[in-house]
Amino acid sequence: MADTARPTTVLNHIGGKDVPAASGAGLPLVDPATGRVHGAAPLSGAEDVDAAQRAAEEAFPGWAATTPAQRQSALLRIADALERDAGALAAAEVTDTGKPRALFLADELPAIVDVLRYFAGAARNLPGAAAAEYTPGRTSVLRREPVGVCAQITPWNYPLMMAVWKVAPALASGNTVVLKPSDTTPTSATLLARTAAAHLPPGVLNVVCGDRDTGRLLVAHPGVRLVAVTGSVRAGREIAAAAAADLKRVHLELGGNAPVLVHEDADLDDAVEQLAPLAFYNAGQDCTAATRLLVHRRIHDAFVTAFADRAARLRTGSPDAPDTDFGPLAHAAQLAGVRGVLDALPDHAEVVTGGAALDRPGFFHQPTVVTGVRQEDEIVRGEVFGPVVTVQPFTDETEALRLANAVPQGLAASVWTRDHDRAMRASRALHTGIVWVNTHGTTVSEMPHGGVRHSGYGSDLSLTGLLDYTQVKHVML
């Protein structure tokens, strides 16, 4: 159990055992709310990655041979155990990320448990074509089979949630896993592995901690057959290129830069009340965050005034303060990146509210709203991944869609209007994997989560996400 009163010691989990890095090397873990080191995690090298891959490979035949009902039972027991261990998981997640404890327990943990329970059931409902004779005297049957050892690399913004999004469909479909969490937030992933070990054969789920070089070793390992990553566009490009050398399958969930189209007929008060907390949730460190607000000129000024006022009333502070809406940035480098974007704003941009880091220990930053930006500005085209929102005006539906689509990313978008036909036109025209109408940011286990263009390919969640971890075999009798 993580405890902020004493140093956190994180270990790898390989073959059902908690072990340090073979070299003894480690990485410091820093509490973003204080800026102080609170523990250490292994810096895994080639020997550790190879041991984890071997453990997963040895466990694969037995796990792949289990029935869907057996895998369902294991995932349900893991879900129940995580629910019981809520306090320990919250302590780990809060200390590594600085996010508000109450929000993790109320929002994230129930969703994490639900994902496990969803995939436990989905494992027993794989789709398939009926056996049939497509040529005389021969019967064709399709089999869906697990891929093998899956390497999974997860980010620091939602450490436990992203680990479960990756692990649950892989295990449900009969694969074994080597998971590498972010170097700054590994604690909850190792707790997940330790909890799962009571319900899985040794080697089915392994965790190796480390840095980017650890991840590179894992991606390049010849025994890995599928690589799944949630991370930056840079990381996605590098991983896809490395995996291509061995023709590994790749599943990429990368950055976002979500446009929010607010039309003149939208309920302005409702839009502001919903969007402001969502834009700054988790300090804006969310690939679907409502970051680019595109607002019709007729209501632009009124919207900016109302939105900036609502944003200014959001509070960033201690993870355990009862009035905290969002916590610090996850680490010093992320805070520096946000500051770099704001410090480089062009003269035509205006900071309406916020704009500064907080003068206190930790990596806190004010909720910030920027207007007057242009489409070619870096703050518009790039993913800030912090508590920063831009607002741009548009004149008509055509311009709104042009601005929305004129960035490299394509993960999520939302449309705010009372006009059903307009909403349907936008849902067709937006180049994103997800479109919300008069809401933003909600995910459900039953629906896919994934993007297009620089936001990657492949889906998390849903039956689609489960099938991504299977391969099809044609059997002719």
Image (cartoon, rainbow, N blue to C red):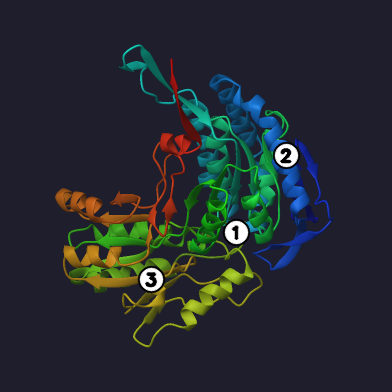
Residue 116 seen by the camera: yes
Residue 356 seen by the camera: no
- Which is more foreground, mark 3 or mark 2? 2
Quick one: label 3 or label 2, which is nearer the N terminus? Answer: 2
Q: Nearer the viewer, residue 454 or 88?
A: 454
Quick one: label 1 or label 3, which is nearer the N terminus? Answer: 1
Q: Amino acid at mark 1?
A: Ala
Q: Pick the quarter of the image with the N terminus.
A: top right
**Callout 2 touching callout 1 (CB < 8 Å):** no
The mark found on residue 321 in the picture is: 1
Q: Amino acid at mark 3?
A: Arg
Q: Amino acid at mark 2?
A: Arg
**Mark 3 and mark 2: span between their CA atoms?**
42 Å
**Mark 1 and mark 3: span between their CA atoms?**
35 Å
- Which is more foreground, mark 2 or mark 1? 2
Question: Residue 178, percent across and down?
Answer: 65, 43
Q: Which residue is mark 3?
A: 381
**Mark 2 and mark 1: span between their CA atoms?**
45 Å
Question: Residue 428, percent across and down?
Answer: 23, 51
**Callout 1 touching callout 3 (CB < 8 Å):** no
Task: Note whether 342 is above or below 108 in the view shown.
Answer: below
Q: Which residue is mark 2?
A: 54
Question: Residue 315, percent across and down?
Answer: 51, 65
